[in-house]
Structure formats: structure tokens, C-alpha cells
Amino acid sequence: MTREADREARAVAQLVGALARAVRALGYYDASHPVFVQARSEALAALERASSSWPALTLGSCGAHLVYDTSGAVLDDEPARVIAERMFKASIVALHLGAGATARDVEGLVSLLAESAERIRDAGGASALFDAESSDAWIADVDFGALFAGTTADLGPLVRHDPVAELALRQ
């Protein structure tokens, strides 16, 4: 791994770790509690650091790990497993955060990942619950039943033609 690739991988791992801590904090505290506010701030700071390497970052859920670039580079440490598992339970195949993502976007994403699978299903899917403030934050959720049954032929529109999200769907 080159020095630049190593630096990028560390930045992504720090962001994923911060997101996992924020999801855990929201499991114990409400969104106004200082512990969650601090965790959200750490996630935003990690996003800013990761944005220095990429103008936008897509994390794709692949079972127990996350992919973050088209080379198939993966994160499979404990925080990545936490986020990948939460994404799978919410039927989210990919999440995308750009440099313009706001604190409200990160809070909405963390809230969604902390939500129960039943509530997400009852709401009509993760997209129905995720109200991004900026266009630099989005999720791609899919009906895994339809996907595994092969009723969806063209995967591109499901994931906004994002190559990392498409890779996650194919793995």
C-alpha cells in the first residue's frame, strides 16, 4: 500500500470509528445529550479529515465489512462491522457523504443507523426516514428480497450509478 493510500485508509477508518461511536451513543442518549453531541462533532471532524483525500466518500456494505473505493479496499475492523451490520439491517447498501454534508446530515445518518429494523420497515424503508439537508449526503437502500430474487436487472439507478455502491451490491 502506498503512503497516500495508507493515509486515505486511516482517514476512512477514523470516520467509520467515529460514526460507530455516535451510533452507540445515540443508542443510550437522545440527540441533545452532550455525549451524543460530542460523538457527532467527532464524526463531523473525521468527515472533514477524510474529505481532504476525497471530495466525496461512499461506504458500501458487504456483509461484515465495508468497501470504500473501486479497487475493493475494505474495512473489516470492529467499527466497520458495526456500521456494516447496521446498514444491512436497515437495507442500506451504501451511504455517501460529500464535503458539503452538514451536521444535520450526519445526525440523520447516525439516527437512521441506530433505528430498529422494524421501524425502518414500517416507515417504508430507510429512504423514507433519511431527510438529508444537503445533496452531498445520500443513502441507497434496496429491497434485498427483490434483489436476491433477481427482479432488479439494472442496479445502477438503485445506487445513483456510484461505482463503490455498485461494487458493494455485486459482492
Image (tube, rainbow, N blue to C red):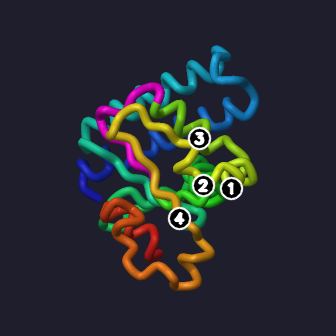
Residue highlighted by disc 2: 125
> Would residue 103 be seen by someone viewing this image from the given angle?
yes
Q: Dot 3 surroundings within 10 Å: few (below 14), some, or many (20 or more)?
A: many
Q: Which stretch is magenta?
A: 95-104
Marks 4 and 3: in contact by CB < 8 Å?
Answer: no
- Answer with the quarter of the image where residue 53 lies: top left
Amino acid residing under circle 3: Ala
Compare marks 3 and 2 and give the one earlier in the sequence: 3
Compare marks 1 and 4 and give the one earlier in the sequence: 1
The circle on residue 20 is: 3
Amino acid residing under circle 4: Val
Q: How many marks?
A: 4
Compare marks 3 and 4 and give the one earlier in the sequence: 3
Marks 2 and 1: in contact by CB < 8 Å?
Answer: yes
User: Residue 123, position in %: x, y?
Assistant: 66, 49
Compare marks 4 and 2 and give the one earlier in the sequence: 2
What residue is drawn where x is 47% and y is 79%? Answer: 152
- Mark 4 lies on a secondary structure that is loop
Q: Dot 2 surroundings within 10 Å: few (below 14), some, or many (20 or more)?
A: some
Residue highlighted by disc 1: 121
Q: Dot 1 surroundings within 10 Å: few (below 14), some, or many (20 or more)?
A: some
The quadrant the N terminus occupies is: bottom left
